[in-house]
Structures are given as structure tokens and as C-alpha cells.
Image: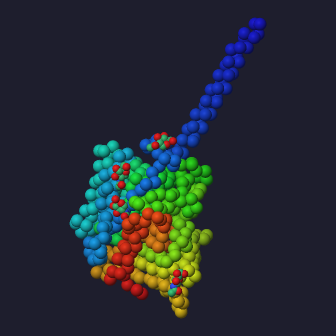
Amino acid sequence: MAGQTIQEPVKTQQKCIAIFALLCCFAVLVVLIFSSVDILGDNEDGITEENCSKNCRIVLVENIPDDLTLSMDGRPHLPLSAGFHTLLDNARHSVEVVSPVWDLNSWDLKTKPGAAKQGQLLFQRLLSLKSRGVKLKIASSLTNSAELKALSASNAEVHFVNMTALTRGGLRSSFWIVDRKHIYIGSADMDWRSLSKRNELGVVVYNCSCLALDLHRVFSFYWQLHDRDYIPSIWSKRVTALYGKHEALELQLNATQATAYVSTSPDLFCPKDRTRDVDAIYQVIQSAKAFVFISVTDYLPLVNRSVRGTSVTRYWSPIDEVIREAVVLRGVKVRLLITFWKKTHPLTFNFVTSLKALCMQLHNCSLEVRFFSHKELKDDIQHGLNHNKYMVTDNALYIGNHDWVGSDFAFNAGVGLAVTMKKGLKDSGVTILEHVKAAFERDWRSHYAKSL
Ligand SMILES: *[C@@H]1O[C@H](CO)[C@@H](O)[C@H](O)[C@H]1NC(C)=O
Ligand SMILES: *[C@@H]1O[C@H](CO)[C@@H](O)[C@H](O)[C@H]1NC(C)=O
Ligand SMILES: *[C@@H]1O[C@H](CO)[C@@H](O)[C@H](O)[C@H]1NC(C)=O
Ligand SMILES: *[C@@H]1O[C@H](CO)[C@@H](O)[C@H](O)[C@H]1NC(C)=O
Ligand SMILES: *[C@@H]1O[C@H](CO)[C@@H](O)[C@H](O)[C@H]1NC(C)=O
Ligand SMILES: *[C@@H]1O[C@H](CO)[C@@H](O)[C@H](O)[C@H]1NC(C)=O
């Protein structure tokens, strides 16, 4: 009897220790799981993939420099700066921004006074988000940006992505996510030139939490690379793709049924199920039946790789290939609008001449190339007047962050948005495709676009 009464407390003690150890393990596990997930604020308004909104509004936003005379055909065209301000007006909780450049105020003394007015205004509005209790989060690969310092001194949380260590490329992504509900994707950077001196084109999508959730996963991916010098082999579920080319999001854009997904590059930045930019471009060109209109600053099917310390340039075929196939084998009409500027690679002319030569003596074959430039504007030659990076076809649209240069897709981080319209019963009015097509045709017909 006596022995039993002595053993009893020992047993409960052992039990206690076991339970305590279990609790510890559990706590460590919880910490481990959530340390790789930005849990706080991740479920703002408790929106999930199941109950997110697919009834969206899409608006084309453009910047057209004052010194260009482009005939607008009386079409409504929302200035890019107005698009950004509307997004900020709508922000209640959070604004998340990725941009390769932060130069809204123009620190360069040579800038004409007034030219950077829109940029300065936008910068002030970003600073003033604090007073409204709206969080500002920025992912960037810049190490010494005066504007990022000013923003983080005010209210912004800035995460540094060391692209040099990760891919030896740059963070070229340019997008906004507001309240996990509204998004912007396009060619413009947080650069005063994007709001005054360059042609820029993008889209703002409102009330579209499904698409915003997916784009937010790209943002979370960058966010988690903060100060890392390697890409983890195991990723939190929070960064894998929700939609892709095989399983696109079905949504409504204004009154039109459409499908959409977000693509990214480089390959190392594509976690499970994420469609690569190149594959999205491939799919959009392949599904074109009648035409493909492309507007990019640079077109160059080459990639630079470093092999044992020396730089080796190789032919990079994916996009060139699919264009050739569409033109020659499917009779799709292709137009390529490229910028002629200081950094236009001399081989660009050889590659586009070769593309044009394809149609020699073929009926029903059309591939045209024009170069966009404005001789009188010196800055045009410096910075590339036509900064657009998009493609529109008879049934789809692709808006990205990269120029169509092999090295960009191979090393630089960027995102793209692929949208396909469903030929529908209730085709009502003008779709986003028609807006973008009209913008392309306006630039194509302008006297700034010249054949070789
Ligand atoms: C969406 O679903 C989540 C989890 O199922 C729930 O917590 C949340 O309240 C829902 N949100 C809305 C807006 O219905
Ligand atoms: C980024 O990574 C490179 C290479 O690992 C390193 O040399 C550099 O110091 C890092 N930069 C910063 C700001 O941490
Ligand atoms: C988004 O939805 C809200 C609530 O349904 C509505 O008040 C608002 O006008 C919508 N925004 C746009 C741009 O359609
Ligand atoms: C590749 O690198 C060389 C030397 O650094 C440079 O001259 C060339 O323009 C680069 N080509 C591409 C496609 O980036
Ligand atoms: C050109 O090709 C397209 C697509 O195959 C076809 O629809 C069209 O009828 C052809 N036009 C001529 C003139 O052959
Ligand atoms: C979609 O609706 C919004 C708001 O009503 C409008 O501003 C925009 O121009 C429409 N977009 C298209 C492509 O018609």
C-alpha cells in the first residue's frame, strides 16, 4: 500500500512532464508554421478563395506625355495618375506596392520645374496614408533610395529583396494591391517620368478580391525573401498560385465574362502552380485567331548567361518561335511596335528584319514592325518614350512588366496579367480588349511610329 502511495505522485509528475513537452512541441510547431506566414492582417476582412469577389470592374489607365500629339478619337482615357489617386481614395486598410524605381520627386536638378508635379503629388499622398491609418508595405531591391528612406521614416514597412544574391537580376515588378481588393498592373514605375514623360499603359481592377488574393501571394513571396540570400526549397502555402493557365480564374470584367491569371518570372520565382510569364505570352499568342498587336520598349530574343565567369550570349527562342508559327502557319496578322532609343540593341534590327522576311512570297501572311520615336525630344532617346509592355489579340490581353528580351525573363523578377474574353451571350458594349486595341492603333498610326 505504502509503495503505491509513493508511486502515485511520481506518475502524475511524469504525466505532467509529458504533457508539458507535448505543449512545447506544439508551441514550437505553431511558431514555425506562422513564422513563414505573415499571419497578421493576412486575412483582412476574412476574405478567402471561397468567398472572394469575381464581379470586377476593369479600367484602362494610360500616361501620354503632353508633348505628344496623339489623336484620341474622343475616347475616354483615364490618366494613370488619376488611377493611382482613385486607388488611394479607396484604401481603408493597406496599400502594397512593388516598383523597380523610386524617383517620384525627381532629385535630378536638371529636371524642368513642374515636370515632376504629378510624381511629387503621388509621393505626398503615399506619405499621408499614415494619417488615415492605412498601412503601406513596399518590397524593393533598392539599397539606397532616398524616397524609401523617407517613406519608412513616416509609416511604410519596406522589405529588401536582394536580387543580386537570388538571381543576379533586378526586381522589375510593378504592381499595387489595395485592401486585397483592388489592383494595378502595368508598365509604369514609381518614377515621375511615368506620370509625365513616357507612354505608359496598365489596368486598374476594382472589387476583385479573387485576383487581388492571387497577386498578393506574389507580394508575400517577395515579402518573405526579406534579407535572405537564398530561395527556400519549401514554401509556405501562402505563396503558391491560386490560378494559372490551366486553371484560370473565371470572373466578370464590367459586363463581360472572362478568365484571368497572374504570371511571374524568373523561373526561380515561380512556386508551385504559378504560370511563367513566357508561358502566359505563349498561350496568348497561340490562342489568337486573327491578330496579335505587341507594344514593347525592346524586342531581343537573346539571353546572356555567365558561364565560368564569362558572359555568353545565346539565342533565346520561345517568343520568336511562337510568333513565327502564328504568322506563317496560322495566318495571324502580327504587328510589333518597338521603341527606338539610346539602348536599342543593334541586333534588334536583324531579328525583326528576319521576322519580316518570313512572309516573303506567302499569301495571307502579314508581319509588320514599326519603331516609335520622337526626334525632338532628347529625353526620349535617354529614357525610352514608349515604355509600354503589352499585347492585345482578338480574344486576349497580356500586360506585363518585362520588355521582350530573353535576359529579362531569365533573371529579372516581373509579373504579368493574362486576360481572355469569353465570346459570350451578353456581349454588351465595349470590352477592355477594344480599349487596349484602340490605344495600340492610335500609337501605331501616329507619326511617331515609323517602318524600318
Ligand atoms: C469568408 O469566409 C471566411 C472563412 O470561411 C469567413 O471567416 C469570412 O467571414 C467570410 N467573409 C465574407 C466577407 O463572407
Ligand atoms: C546582397 O547579396 C550580395 C551577394 O550575396 C552581397 O554581396 C550584398 O552585400 C547583399 N546586399 C545587401 C544590401 O545585403
Ligand atoms: C465596388 O463595390 C462597392 C460595394 O459593392 C461599390 O460601392 C463600389 O462602387 C464598387 N467600385 C467600383 C469601382 O465599381
Ligand atoms: C550581354 O552582355 C554583353 C556584355 O556584357 C553586352 O554587350 C550585351 O549587350 C548583352 N546582351 C544582352 C542580350 O543583354
Ligand atoms: C487567311 O488565314 C485566315 C486564318 O487561317 C483565314 O481565316 C482567312 O480566310 C485567310 N485569308 C485568305 C485571303 O486566304
Ligand atoms: C468598366 O466600368 C468602369 C466603371 O463603371 C468604367 O469606368 C470603365 O471604363 C469600364 N471599362 C470598360 C473596359 O468598359
Q: Position of residue 352 (x, y in %)?
A: 49, 83
Rendered view: 165 above or below 305:
above
Q: Looking at this rendering, what residue extends furthest in the front direction? A: 425
Q: Looking at this rendering, what residue extends furthest in the bottom direction? A: 361
Q: Nearer the viewer, residue 16 or 327?
A: 327
Q: Residue drawn at (35%, 46%), measured in percent from left and top?
A: 92
Q: Residue drawn at (28%, 81%), measured in percent from left and top?
A: 376
Q: Position of residue 251 (x, y in %)?
A: 47, 57
Q: Residue 65 vs residue 52: left or right?
A: left
Q: Position of residue 356 (x, y in %)?
A: 50, 86
Q: Residue drawn at (57%, 37%), measured in percent from left and top?
A: 30
Q: Residue drawn at (47%, 76%), measured in percent from left and top?
A: 292
Q: Is residue 162 visible?
A: no
Rendered view: 322 above or below 13:
below
Q: Looking at this rendering, what residue extends furthest in the top direction? A: 2
Q: Looking at this rendering, what residue extends furthest in the left direction? A: 113
